């Protein structure tokens, strides 16, 4: 059955951003409910270590591991056997991602507040990160690139990658993550790779895992990044505080803002490209053109029948999370766009650059007819680990900054402290914390 994308007509309505958030469709994901399932899993990993990881991997992935760590020779073999076209694509993706992420590196800055008094903001990478690469319906060597490159650009000294083992791997890779993922790790110089997925992988990075002799198999991480399913997301929420996290990733989403100048076939193909990820993926077209809406519906029907993952795409596009939203004009469309705060936003309108400059909330913006989301997924140079579920209202995609900590270094000499001492004392007394003030006056005995 071909998908029927529902229509949502907002023409003539003047809704504020809160009302728009309530009516525009979005995939539902009950992370709170999933916490009850992942809590005992994480506790088992904390208490039982590697034996729990082996048992949980067999239970959830159908693979009986003999070791959770991927041997280095398997990484080398995966790279040697990688399809040359895929290798070339990964190498170009890495090259472009390095160009963009190397430019994001922050320099330390020193501000002279008064003569003899300075504050320096020093940017320091976290010591160790655990990078999660999904391996469910599809495998994502591109996500290896998107996680590793900014961590390397930030200067993180310890980088580990984990991905679920695959049951249907080619000979020689049984019980390991997909060879394309291993090859991507090898291309990037990452040799610490684990065959662990799901909530148990997040727990492994949070608590670390020791061998029977007390030595570390996997040391604890300071930060865990990378998208995953609801169980990975729930584990990240549960363990936040023990570890830092980048975000809580939900189902992928695309929103296209288009007027009657847009090519309906381009729009249809872009909606389908994200619907291909997951039956829960959201695909939303916002347009002021009823003609374009109808033409896109026709184009979608024609393309869905010919695409590989027809059933998955159909479920996504016909689900409550997807829609064609009719608005009065591009200005009204921008109000919907900012309320929705899409993970991926395409602008296919006249003066697309100018329209895009007015957007305040989006994970990434793809401007014009030749900037499809799939370009950003692989080879734009941008990062494809992006906020979902409206989180782009207050958060950013993965970048070099995700792996850095800002430390303020305060250096005052005697004269500089003496000049501000009376202000410190006054403020400390106002907060009924007199010892704070005395810590200053003690340096200037009468």
Image (cartoon, grey):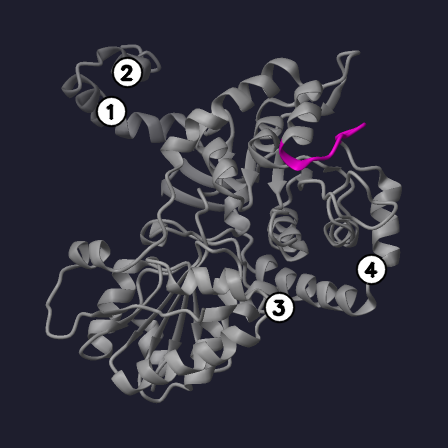
What mark, if any, has residue 436 been given in the picture? Answer: 2
CA–CA distance in space, label 3 to label 1: 53 Å
Residue placed under numbered mark 1 in the picture: 424
313 lies left or right of 183: left
Q: If you read the primary sequence from the N terminus, does the residue marked by circle 2 or circle 1 appear first?
A: 1
* Callouts 3 and 2 close, C-beta under 8 Å: no
CA–CA distance in space, label 3 to label 4: 18 Å
Residue placed under numbered mark 4 in the picture: 82
What mark, if any, has residue 382 been given in the picture? Answer: none
- The residues colored magenta run 60-68
Q: If you read the primary sequence from the N terminus, does the residue marked by circle 4 or circle 1 appear first?
A: 4
Residue placed under numbered mark 3 in the picture: 379
Residue 405 horizontal/vertical position (percent): 50, 38
Secondary element under disc 4, as helix, strand or loop, is loop
* Callouts 2 and 1 close, C-beta under 8 Å: yes
Secondary element under disc 3, as helix, strand or loop, is loop
In front: label 3 or label 4: 4
Q: Nearer the viewer, residue 160 or 431?
A: 160
Secondary element under disc 1, as helix, strand or loop, is helix
CA–CA distance in space, label 2 to label 4: 63 Å
Q: Nearer the viewer, residue 436 or 5?
A: 5
């Amino acid at each position: 059955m071909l998908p029927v994308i529902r229509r949502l007509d907002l023409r003539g309505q003047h809704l504020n951003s809160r009302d728009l958030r309530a009516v525009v469709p979005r995939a539902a994901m009950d992370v709170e409910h999933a916490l009850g399932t992942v809590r005992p899993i994480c506790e088992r990993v904390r208490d039982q270590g590697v034996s729990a990881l082996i048992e949980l991997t067999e239970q959830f992935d159908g693979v009986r591991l003999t070791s959770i760590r991927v041997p280095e020779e398997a990484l080398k073999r995966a790279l040697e056997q990688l399809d040359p076209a895929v290798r070339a694509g990964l190498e170009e993706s890495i090259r472009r991602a390095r160009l963009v992420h190397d430019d994001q590196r922050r320099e330390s800055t020193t501000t002279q507040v008064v003569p003899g008094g300075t504050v320096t903001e020093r940017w320091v990478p976290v010591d160790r990160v655990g990078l999660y690469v999904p391996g469910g319906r599809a495998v994502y060597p591109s996500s290896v690139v998107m996680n590793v490159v900014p961590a390397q650009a930030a200067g993180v000294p310890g980088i580990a990658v984990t991905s679920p083992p695959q049951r249907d791997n080619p000979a020689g890779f049984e019980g390991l993550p997909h060879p394309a993922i291993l090859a991507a790790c090898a291309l990037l110089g990452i040799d610490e790779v684990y065959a662990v997925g799901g909530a148990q992988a997040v727990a492994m990075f949070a608590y670390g895992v020791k061998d029977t002799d007390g030595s570390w198999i996997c040391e604890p991480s300071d930060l865990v990044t990378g998208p995953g399913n609801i169980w990975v997301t729930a584990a990240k929420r549960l363990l936040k505080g023990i570890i830092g996290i980048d975000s809580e990733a939900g189902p992928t989403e695309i929103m296209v803002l288009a007027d009657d100048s847009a090519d309906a076939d381009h729009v249809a193909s872009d909606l389908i490209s994200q619907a291909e990820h997951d039956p829960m993926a959201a695909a939303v077209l916002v347009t002021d053109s009823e003609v374009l809406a109808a033409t896109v519906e026709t184009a979608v029907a024609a393309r869905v029948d010919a695409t590989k993952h027809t059933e998955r795409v159909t479920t996504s596009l016909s689900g409550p999370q997807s829609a064609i939203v009719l608005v009065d004009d591009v200005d009204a469309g921008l109000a919907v766009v900012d309320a929705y705060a899409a993970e991926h936003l395409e602008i296919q309108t006249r003066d697309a650059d100018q329209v895009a400059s007015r957007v305040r909330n989006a994970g990434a913006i793809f401007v014009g007819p030749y900037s499809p989301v799939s370009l950003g997924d692989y080879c734009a140079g941008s990062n494809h680990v992006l906020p979902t579920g409206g989180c782009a209202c207050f958060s950013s995609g993965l970048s070099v900054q995700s792996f850095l900590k800002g430390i303020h270094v305060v250096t005052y000499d005697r004269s500089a402290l003496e000049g501000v001492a009376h202000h410190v004392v006054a403020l400390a007394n106002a907060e009924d914390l007199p010892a704070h003030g005395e810590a200053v006056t003690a340096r200037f005995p009468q």
